[in-house]
Amino acid sequence: MSEKDVDVMVVGAGLAGLTAARLLSGHGVRVLVLEARDRVGGRTLSHRTPAGDTIDLGAQWIGPTQDRVAALAAEFGVRTFEQFTTGRKILSIAGRTTSYSSAIPSLPLLSLLSLNKLIRQLGALCSQVPLEAPHTAARAAEWDAMTVESWKLASVATSATRSIVDVAVRAVFAAEPADISFLFFLFYLHSGGGLLRLTQTTDGAQQTRFTEGAQSLSIRLAERLGDRVRCSAPVRAIMQVGDRVRVSSDLGTHEARYVVVAVPPTLAGRIHYDPPMPAARDQIVQRVPMGSVIKSVAFYERPFWRDEGFSGEAMSDQGPVTLVVDDSPETGSPGALLAFILGAQARTWSRRSAEDRRRAVIGCLVSLFGSKAAKPDHYIDRDWSSEPWSGGCYTGILPPGVLTAYGDVLRAPVGRIHWAGTETARVWNGYMDGAIESGHRVAKEVLSRLNAAS
Protein backbone atom coordinates (compact mmCIF):
# COMPACT_ATOMS: atom_id res chain seq x y z
CA MET A 1 0.00 0.00 0.00
CA SER A 2 1.36 3.42 -0.95
CA GLU A 3 1.30 6.00 1.80
CA LYS A 4 0.29 8.56 -0.81
CA ASP A 5 -3.05 6.75 -1.16
CA VAL A 6 -3.95 6.84 2.55
CA ASP A 7 -7.15 8.52 3.66
CA VAL A 8 -6.51 8.37 7.40
CA MET A 9 -3.35 8.02 9.46
CA VAL A 10 -3.72 6.65 12.98
CA VAL A 11 -1.06 7.42 15.58
CA GLY A 12 -0.93 4.68 18.20
CA ALA A 13 -1.68 0.95 17.97
CA GLY A 14 -3.41 0.46 21.29
CA LEU A 15 -7.05 -0.53 21.55
CA ALA A 16 -8.28 2.97 20.67
CA GLY A 17 -6.20 3.39 17.53
CA LEU A 18 -6.65 -0.15 16.28
CA THR A 19 -10.41 -0.02 16.86
CA ALA A 20 -10.67 3.21 14.88
CA ALA A 21 -8.49 1.82 12.08
CA ARG A 22 -10.52 -1.36 11.85
CA LEU A 23 -13.86 0.45 11.68
CA LEU A 24 -12.58 2.90 9.07
CA SER A 25 -11.04 0.11 7.01
CA GLY A 26 -14.33 -1.78 7.15
CA HIS A 27 -15.96 1.19 5.40
CA GLY A 28 -13.42 1.13 2.60
CA VAL A 29 -11.22 3.87 4.06
CA ARG A 30 -7.52 3.48 3.33
CA VAL A 31 -5.76 3.51 6.70
CA LEU A 32 -2.21 3.38 7.99
CA VAL A 33 -1.41 2.93 11.70
CA LEU A 34 1.92 4.11 13.08
CA GLU A 35 3.05 2.76 16.46
CA ALA A 36 6.11 3.97 18.37
CA ARG A 37 6.74 0.68 20.18
CA ASP A 38 8.00 -2.50 18.57
CA ARG A 39 4.67 -4.10 19.45
CA VAL A 40 0.96 -3.33 19.45
CA GLY A 41 -1.23 -3.10 22.54
CA GLY A 42 -0.30 0.20 24.18
CA ARG A 43 -0.88 -0.07 27.91
CA THR A 44 -1.71 -3.76 27.65
CA LEU A 45 1.29 -6.07 27.80
CA SER A 46 1.06 -9.84 28.22
CA HIS A 47 4.04 -11.88 29.42
CA ARG A 48 4.81 -15.57 29.03
CA THR A 49 6.18 -17.06 32.24
CA PRO A 50 8.92 -19.72 32.38
CA ALA A 51 6.15 -22.26 33.03
CA GLY A 52 4.39 -21.23 29.81
CA ASP A 53 1.47 -19.37 31.40
CA THR A 54 0.39 -15.88 30.34
CA ILE A 55 0.09 -13.00 32.79
CA ASP A 56 -0.59 -9.32 32.21
CA LEU A 57 1.93 -6.66 33.14
CA GLY A 58 -0.46 -3.94 31.96
CA ALA A 59 -4.25 -3.65 31.95
CA GLN A 60 -5.83 -7.03 32.59
CA TRP A 61 -9.40 -7.05 33.92
CA ILE A 62 -12.89 -6.41 32.60
CA GLY A 63 -16.23 -6.43 34.39
CA PRO A 64 -19.98 -5.93 34.07
CA THR A 65 -21.19 -3.20 31.65
CA GLN A 66 -17.85 -3.21 29.81
CA ASP A 67 -19.78 -4.43 26.81
CA ARG A 68 -17.46 -3.23 24.04
CA VAL A 69 -14.37 -5.05 25.23
CA ALA A 70 -16.41 -8.15 26.08
CA ALA A 71 -17.93 -8.17 22.58
CA LEU A 72 -14.48 -7.84 20.99
CA ALA A 73 -13.16 -10.76 23.03
CA ALA A 74 -16.18 -12.89 22.06
CA GLU A 75 -15.81 -12.00 18.38
CA PHE A 76 -12.14 -13.00 18.35
CA GLY A 77 -12.66 -16.11 20.48
CA VAL A 78 -10.43 -14.78 23.26
CA ARG A 79 -11.30 -16.88 26.31
CA THR A 80 -11.90 -15.39 29.73
CA PHE A 81 -12.08 -16.69 33.29
CA GLU A 82 -13.20 -15.30 36.61
CA GLN A 83 -10.74 -13.68 38.97
CA PHE A 84 -10.21 -15.93 41.99
CA THR A 85 -12.01 -14.48 45.03
CA THR A 86 -12.76 -17.41 47.34
CA GLY A 87 -11.60 -16.87 50.92
CA ARG A 88 -10.86 -14.06 53.29
CA LYS A 89 -9.28 -10.75 52.30
CA ILE A 90 -6.57 -8.96 54.27
CA LEU A 91 -6.69 -5.31 55.34
CA SER A 92 -3.68 -3.59 56.91
CA ILE A 93 -4.57 -0.07 58.03
CA ALA A 94 -2.74 2.14 60.55
CA GLY A 95 -0.57 -0.75 61.71
CA ARG A 96 -3.56 -3.04 62.38
CA THR A 97 -4.06 -6.13 60.18
CA THR A 98 -7.46 -7.81 59.96
CA SER A 99 -9.25 -10.11 57.54
CA TYR A 100 -12.79 -10.08 56.20
CA SER A 101 -15.03 -11.94 53.75
CA SER A 102 -17.60 -9.33 52.70
CA ALA A 103 -17.30 -6.67 49.99
CA ILE A 104 -16.84 -4.00 52.68
CA PRO A 105 -13.73 -4.17 54.89
CA SER A 106 -14.02 -5.08 58.57
CA LEU A 107 -13.83 -1.79 60.49
CA PRO A 108 -14.80 -0.42 63.90
CA LEU A 109 -18.49 0.46 64.03
CA LEU A 110 -18.10 4.23 63.65
CA SER A 111 -15.72 3.80 60.72
CA LEU A 112 -18.01 1.26 59.09
CA LEU A 113 -20.97 3.62 59.40
CA SER A 114 -18.81 6.42 58.00
CA LEU A 115 -17.75 4.28 55.03
CA ASN A 116 -21.32 3.25 54.20
CA LYS A 117 -22.39 6.90 54.36
CA LEU A 118 -19.48 7.86 52.15
CA ILE A 119 -20.41 5.32 49.46
CA ARG A 120 -24.01 6.55 49.36
CA GLN A 121 -22.89 10.19 49.29
CA LEU A 122 -20.48 9.67 46.43
CA GLY A 123 -23.13 7.79 44.48
CA ALA A 124 -25.50 10.73 44.79
CA LEU A 125 -22.84 13.30 43.89
CA CYS A 126 -21.34 11.54 40.88
CA SER A 127 -24.79 11.12 39.30
CA GLN A 128 -24.91 14.93 39.09
CA VAL A 129 -21.89 15.04 36.74
CA PRO A 130 -22.88 14.72 33.05
CA LEU A 131 -20.76 12.13 31.25
CA GLU A 132 -20.89 14.07 27.99
CA ALA A 133 -19.71 17.35 29.54
CA PRO A 134 -18.65 17.06 33.20
CA HIS A 135 -17.56 20.71 33.25
CA THR A 136 -21.23 21.72 32.90
CA ALA A 137 -22.29 20.17 36.22
CA ALA A 138 -24.17 22.64 38.43
CA ARG A 139 -21.42 22.52 41.08
CA ALA A 140 -18.52 22.09 38.64
CA ALA A 141 -16.64 25.22 39.72
CA GLU A 142 -16.89 24.27 43.40
CA TRP A 143 -15.86 20.66 42.90
CA ASP A 144 -13.07 21.43 40.43
CA ALA A 145 -11.53 23.87 42.88
CA MET A 146 -10.83 21.11 45.42
CA THR A 147 -8.86 17.89 45.45
CA VAL A 148 -10.12 14.54 46.63
CA GLU A 149 -7.81 15.05 49.60
CA SER A 150 -9.39 18.35 50.64
CA TRP A 151 -12.88 16.89 50.20
CA LYS A 152 -11.88 13.85 52.26
CA LEU A 153 -10.53 15.93 55.14
CA ALA A 154 -13.71 18.01 55.21
CA SER A 155 -16.21 15.18 54.74
CA VAL A 156 -14.86 11.90 56.14
CA ALA A 157 -15.27 11.54 59.88
CA THR A 158 -12.86 8.82 61.05
CA SER A 159 -9.17 8.21 60.43
CA ALA A 160 -9.78 4.56 59.49
CA THR A 161 -12.29 5.57 56.81
CA ARG A 162 -9.88 8.21 55.53
CA SER A 163 -7.23 5.52 55.18
CA ILE A 164 -9.69 3.36 53.22
CA VAL A 165 -10.34 6.32 50.90
CA ASP A 166 -6.58 6.74 50.37
CA VAL A 167 -6.13 3.07 49.49
CA ALA A 168 -9.17 3.05 47.18
CA VAL A 169 -8.04 6.17 45.33
CA ARG A 170 -4.54 4.77 44.85
CA ALA A 171 -5.95 1.45 43.63
CA VAL A 172 -8.35 3.05 41.11
CA PHE A 173 -6.23 5.97 39.85
CA ALA A 174 -2.61 5.02 40.60
CA ALA A 175 -2.39 8.51 42.10
CA GLU A 176 -2.80 10.27 45.44
CA PRO A 177 -6.02 11.96 46.63
CA ALA A 178 -4.11 15.27 46.62
CA ASP A 179 -3.37 14.85 42.88
CA ILE A 180 -6.95 14.63 41.68
CA SER A 181 -9.71 17.17 41.07
CA PHE A 182 -12.85 16.23 42.99
CA LEU A 183 -14.90 17.00 39.87
CA PHE A 184 -12.77 14.63 37.79
CA PHE A 185 -13.05 12.05 40.57
CA LEU A 186 -16.86 12.23 40.46
CA PHE A 187 -16.89 12.06 36.66
CA TYR A 188 -14.61 9.01 36.73
CA LEU A 189 -16.82 7.24 39.27
CA HIS A 190 -19.92 8.00 37.20
CA SER A 191 -18.17 6.87 34.02
CA GLY A 192 -17.38 3.47 35.58
CA GLY A 193 -20.62 2.87 37.48
CA GLY A 194 -19.69 4.08 40.96
CA LEU A 195 -17.07 3.53 43.63
CA LEU A 196 -18.06 -0.04 44.47
CA ARG A 197 -18.04 -1.17 40.86
CA LEU A 198 -14.59 0.34 40.34
CA THR A 199 -13.11 -1.22 43.49
CA GLN A 200 -14.87 -4.59 43.68
CA THR A 201 -13.91 -7.86 42.07
CA THR A 202 -17.23 -9.73 42.00
CA ASP A 203 -19.66 -7.60 39.97
CA GLY A 204 -16.86 -5.09 39.63
CA ALA A 205 -14.17 -3.89 37.26
CA GLN A 206 -11.75 -6.65 38.35
CA GLN A 207 -14.12 -9.58 37.79
CA THR A 208 -12.76 -11.24 34.64
CA ARG A 209 -9.35 -11.99 33.14
CA PHE A 210 -8.21 -13.09 29.69
CA THR A 211 -6.70 -16.56 29.38
CA GLU A 212 -4.31 -15.37 26.65
CA GLY A 213 -3.79 -11.96 28.23
CA ALA A 214 -5.42 -8.62 27.47
CA GLN A 215 -2.84 -7.76 24.80
CA SER A 216 -4.29 -10.57 22.66
CA LEU A 217 -7.17 -8.26 21.73
CA SER A 218 -4.81 -5.74 20.12
CA ILE A 219 -2.80 -8.52 18.50
CA ARG A 220 -5.97 -9.90 16.89
CA LEU A 221 -7.00 -6.44 15.69
CA ALA A 222 -3.55 -5.82 14.21
CA GLU A 223 -3.54 -9.22 12.47
CA ARG A 224 -6.73 -8.26 10.64
CA LEU A 225 -5.23 -4.96 9.55
CA GLY A 226 -2.08 -6.64 8.29
CA ASP A 227 0.54 -4.36 6.75
CA ARG A 228 -1.62 -1.34 7.54
CA VAL A 229 0.03 -1.40 10.99
CA ARG A 230 3.67 -0.29 11.23
CA CYS A 231 5.59 -0.63 14.50
CA SER A 232 8.82 1.09 15.59
CA ALA A 233 7.49 4.25 13.96
CA PRO A 234 7.21 7.01 16.57
CA VAL A 235 5.51 10.08 15.13
CA ARG A 236 7.59 13.24 15.58
CA ALA A 237 5.62 15.90 13.68
CA ILE A 238 2.21 16.52 12.10
CA MET A 239 1.79 19.28 9.51
CA GLN A 240 -1.55 20.41 8.12
CA VAL A 241 -1.22 21.78 4.59
CA GLY A 242 -4.43 22.61 2.74
CA ASP A 243 -6.55 19.48 2.44
CA ARG A 244 -3.73 17.12 3.40
CA VAL A 245 -1.88 16.20 6.59
CA ARG A 246 1.78 15.23 6.56
CA VAL A 247 2.92 12.91 9.32
CA SER A 248 6.64 12.53 9.98
CA SER A 249 7.75 9.37 11.78
CA ASP A 250 10.95 7.40 12.09
CA LEU A 251 9.82 5.52 8.96
CA GLY A 252 9.59 8.69 6.90
CA THR A 253 6.89 11.16 5.89
CA HIS A 254 3.36 10.00 5.10
CA GLU A 255 0.34 11.87 3.85
CA ALA A 256 -3.37 11.51 4.55
CA ARG A 257 -6.61 13.46 4.45
CA TYR A 258 -7.12 13.12 8.20
CA VAL A 259 -5.13 12.00 11.25
CA VAL A 260 -6.34 10.26 14.40
CA VAL A 261 -3.99 10.70 17.37
CA ALA A 262 -4.77 7.84 19.77
CA VAL A 263 -2.17 8.26 22.51
CA PRO A 264 -2.39 9.76 26.02
CA PRO A 265 -2.63 13.57 26.06
CA THR A 266 0.82 13.98 27.61
CA LEU A 267 2.38 12.01 24.73
CA ALA A 268 0.27 13.81 22.13
CA GLY A 269 1.75 17.02 23.51
CA ARG A 270 5.28 15.87 22.60
CA ILE A 271 4.47 15.81 18.89
CA HIS A 272 5.42 18.93 16.91
CA TYR A 273 2.44 20.48 15.13
CA ASP A 274 2.51 22.91 12.20
CA PRO A 275 0.59 25.14 12.44
CA PRO A 276 0.87 25.06 16.24
CA MET A 277 -2.00 23.80 18.33
CA PRO A 278 -4.50 26.38 19.59
CA ALA A 279 -3.56 27.70 23.01
CA ALA A 280 -6.28 25.74 24.85
CA ARG A 281 -5.22 22.44 23.26
CA ASP A 282 -1.57 23.15 24.00
CA GLN A 283 -2.41 24.03 27.58
CA ILE A 284 -4.50 20.97 28.39
CA VAL A 285 -1.85 18.44 27.33
CA GLN A 286 0.46 20.10 29.85
CA ARG A 287 -2.10 19.47 32.58
CA VAL A 288 -2.96 15.75 32.27
CA PRO A 289 -0.19 13.81 34.06
CA MET A 290 -0.23 10.03 34.01
CA GLY A 291 -0.76 7.87 37.06
CA SER A 292 2.20 6.03 38.59
CA VAL A 293 2.19 2.25 38.96
CA ILE A 294 4.64 -0.61 39.26
CA LYS A 295 3.19 -4.09 38.84
CA SER A 296 5.15 -6.90 40.50
CA VAL A 297 4.33 -10.60 40.25
CA ALA A 298 5.77 -13.29 42.52
CA PHE A 299 5.31 -16.95 41.51
CA TYR A 300 5.14 -19.93 43.85
CA GLU A 301 4.86 -23.67 43.32
CA ARG A 302 1.24 -23.47 44.41
CA PRO A 303 -1.16 -20.82 45.75
CA PHE A 304 -0.49 -21.56 49.41
CA TRP A 305 -2.78 -18.75 50.58
CA ARG A 306 -5.78 -20.60 49.16
CA ASP A 307 -4.93 -23.60 51.34
CA GLU A 308 -5.07 -21.28 54.34
CA GLY A 309 -8.50 -19.86 53.43
CA PHE A 310 -7.39 -16.58 51.84
CA SER A 311 -8.32 -15.17 48.45
CA GLY A 312 -4.93 -13.58 47.88
CA GLU A 313 -6.46 -10.09 48.01
CA ALA A 314 -4.90 -7.60 50.40
CA MET A 315 -4.94 -3.83 50.88
CA SER A 316 -2.44 -1.82 52.89
CA ASP A 317 -1.69 1.81 53.67
CA GLN A 318 1.85 1.02 54.80
CA GLY A 319 3.66 0.69 51.49
CA PRO A 320 5.36 0.23 49.28
CA VAL A 321 2.64 -2.24 48.23
CA THR A 322 -0.91 -0.89 48.29
CA LEU A 323 -2.86 -3.75 46.73
CA VAL A 324 -2.31 -7.49 46.22
CA VAL A 325 -4.43 -9.96 44.25
CA ASP A 326 -4.22 -13.61 43.26
CA ASP A 327 -2.67 -13.65 39.78
CA SER A 328 -2.51 -17.42 39.35
CA PRO A 329 -3.48 -18.81 35.95
CA GLU A 330 -6.91 -20.33 35.38
CA THR A 331 -5.64 -23.78 36.43
CA GLY A 332 -4.50 -22.39 39.78
CA SER A 333 -0.93 -23.56 39.30
CA PRO A 334 1.61 -22.19 39.70
CA GLY A 335 0.49 -19.75 42.36
CA ALA A 336 1.08 -16.06 41.72
CA LEU A 337 0.59 -12.92 43.76
CA LEU A 338 0.31 -9.60 41.93
CA ALA A 339 1.47 -6.61 44.00
CA PHE A 340 0.77 -3.00 43.02
CA ILE A 341 3.03 -0.13 44.00
CA LEU A 342 0.92 2.96 43.39
CA GLY A 343 0.92 6.76 43.44
CA ALA A 344 3.58 8.41 45.59
CA GLN A 345 5.09 5.05 46.51
CA ALA A 346 5.55 4.24 42.80
CA ARG A 347 7.22 7.61 42.23
CA THR A 348 9.67 6.83 45.02
CA TRP A 349 10.35 3.23 44.09
CA SER A 350 10.69 3.99 40.37
CA ARG A 351 13.98 5.64 41.30
CA ARG A 352 15.20 2.53 43.12
CA SER A 353 16.78 -0.52 41.51
CA ALA A 354 14.72 -3.50 40.42
CA GLU A 355 16.45 -5.60 43.08
CA ASP A 356 15.59 -3.10 45.81
CA ARG A 357 11.97 -3.19 44.67
CA ARG A 358 11.98 -6.96 44.69
CA ARG A 359 13.18 -7.11 48.28
CA ALA A 360 10.64 -4.52 49.38
CA VAL A 361 7.72 -6.23 47.61
CA ILE A 362 8.61 -9.67 48.96
CA GLY A 363 8.89 -8.13 52.43
CA CYS A 364 5.36 -6.76 52.09
CA LEU A 365 4.03 -10.12 50.89
CA VAL A 366 5.62 -11.83 53.88
CA SER A 367 4.05 -9.32 56.28
CA LEU A 368 0.64 -9.97 54.73
CA PHE A 369 0.75 -13.69 53.88
CA GLY A 370 3.45 -15.14 56.12
CA SER A 371 6.84 -16.77 55.65
CA LYS A 372 5.74 -18.97 52.73
CA ALA A 373 5.80 -15.82 50.57
CA ALA A 374 9.49 -15.23 51.27
CA LYS A 375 11.01 -17.31 48.47
CA PRO A 376 9.14 -17.08 45.16
CA ASP A 377 10.27 -19.34 42.33
CA HIS A 378 10.13 -16.46 39.87
CA TYR A 379 9.60 -12.72 40.07
CA ILE A 380 9.00 -9.96 37.53
CA ASP A 381 8.03 -6.31 37.72
CA ARG A 382 7.10 -3.56 35.27
CA ASP A 383 7.53 0.13 36.07
CA TRP A 384 5.14 1.94 33.73
CA SER A 385 6.49 5.38 34.58
CA SER A 386 9.75 4.40 32.91
CA GLU A 387 7.98 3.38 29.69
CA PRO A 388 8.72 6.24 27.24
CA TRP A 389 5.66 5.53 25.08
CA SER A 390 3.29 5.40 28.06
CA GLY A 391 4.67 7.92 30.51
CA GLY A 392 2.86 6.12 33.31
CA CYS A 393 -0.37 4.21 33.92
CA TYR A 394 -3.19 3.53 34.28
CA THR A 395 -4.48 6.73 32.67
CA GLY A 396 -4.25 10.52 32.57
CA ILE A 397 -5.24 12.29 35.80
CA LEU A 398 -6.93 15.69 35.87
CA PRO A 399 -5.82 17.99 38.71
CA PRO A 400 -8.01 20.84 40.02
CA GLY A 401 -9.05 23.53 37.56
CA VAL A 402 -8.51 21.54 34.36
CA LEU A 403 -12.01 20.29 33.60
CA THR A 404 -13.73 23.63 34.11
CA ALA A 405 -11.10 25.50 32.06
CA TYR A 406 -10.59 22.99 29.25
CA GLY A 407 -13.44 20.47 29.53
CA ASP A 408 -14.51 20.92 25.92
CA VAL A 409 -11.00 20.58 24.47
CA LEU A 410 -9.87 16.96 24.93
CA ARG A 411 -12.15 15.52 22.21
CA ALA A 412 -12.48 18.57 19.93
CA PRO A 413 -10.78 18.11 16.51
CA VAL A 414 -8.14 20.62 15.47
CA GLY A 415 -8.39 21.08 11.73
CA ARG A 416 -7.91 17.63 10.24
CA ILE A 417 -6.56 16.10 13.45
CA HIS A 418 -8.90 14.05 15.64
CA TRP A 419 -8.23 12.69 19.13
CA ALA A 420 -8.89 9.27 20.67
CA GLY A 421 -7.69 7.26 23.65
CA THR A 422 -9.30 6.17 26.89
CA GLU A 423 -8.75 9.64 28.39
CA THR A 424 -11.34 10.96 25.91
CA ALA A 425 -13.99 8.33 26.72
CA ARG A 426 -17.38 9.17 28.17
CA VAL A 427 -18.04 5.69 29.59
CA TRP A 428 -15.37 3.62 31.35
CA ASN A 429 -12.90 6.46 31.03
CA GLY A 430 -9.41 5.16 31.82
CA TYR A 431 -10.24 1.51 31.03
CA MET A 432 -9.87 -0.76 28.01
CA ASP A 433 -13.59 -0.43 27.33
CA GLY A 434 -13.21 3.35 27.28
CA ALA A 435 -10.37 3.07 24.77
CA ILE A 436 -12.60 1.04 22.45
CA GLU A 437 -15.47 3.52 22.94
CA SER A 438 -13.16 6.36 21.88
CA GLY A 439 -12.12 4.39 18.80
CA HIS A 440 -15.78 4.00 17.78
CA ARG A 441 -16.45 7.70 18.35
CA VAL A 442 -13.47 9.00 16.41
CA ALA A 443 -14.11 6.63 13.49
CA LYS A 444 -17.65 8.01 13.20
CA GLU A 445 -16.31 11.57 13.30
CA VAL A 446 -13.83 10.95 10.49
CA LEU A 447 -16.28 8.92 8.40
CA SER A 448 -18.77 11.76 8.60
CA ARG A 449 -16.19 14.21 7.26
CA LEU A 450 -15.02 11.83 4.54
CA ASN A 451 -18.59 11.22 3.40
CA ALA A 452 -19.41 14.94 3.44
CA ALA A 453 -16.40 15.65 1.23
CA SER A 454 -17.13 12.88 -1.28
Image: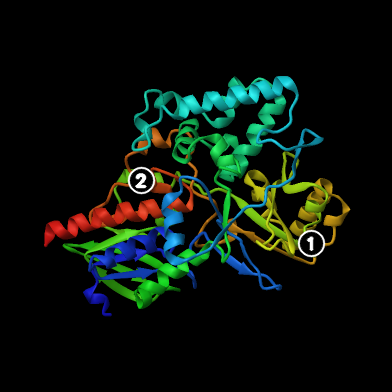
Q: Secondary structure at mark 1?
A: loop
Q: Please state, as top left, top right, bottom left or bottom right, where the C terminus lies in the image.
A: bottom left
- Residue plotted at (38% across, 64% down): 18
Neighbour tally class for label 2: few under 14, some 14-19, many 20 plus, Cα within 10 Å: some
User: Residue 193 at x, y = what percent?
Assistant: 48, 37
User: Residue 298 at x, y = what percent?
Assistant: 74, 60
Residue closest to the eye, 372 or 309: 309
Neighbour tally class for label 1: few under 14, some 14-19, many 20 plus, Cα within 10 Å: some
Furthest toward the left, the residue is 454
Furthest toward the bottom, the residue is 1
Q: How is the image coloured?
A: rainbow
Residue closest to the eye, 242 or 293: 293
Q: Which mark is residue 255?
A: none
Q: CA distance from mark 1 to mark 2?
A: 46 Å
| Depicted 141 relative to depicted 287: above or below | above
- Does any portion of residue 147 appear in the rendered image? yes
Q: Amino acid at mark 1?
A: Arg
- Residue plotted at (21% across, 65% down): 257
Sequence-wise, which precedes: disc 1 or disc 2? 1
Q: Secondary structure at mark 2?
A: loop
Q: Please state, as top left, top right, bottom left or bottom right, where the N terminus lies in the image.
A: bottom left
Q: According to the image, label 2 marks what residue?
A: 410
Q: Amino acid at mark 2?
A: Leu
Q: According to the image, label 1 marks what residue?
A: 302
User: Residue 198 at x, y = what percent?
Assistant: 55, 41
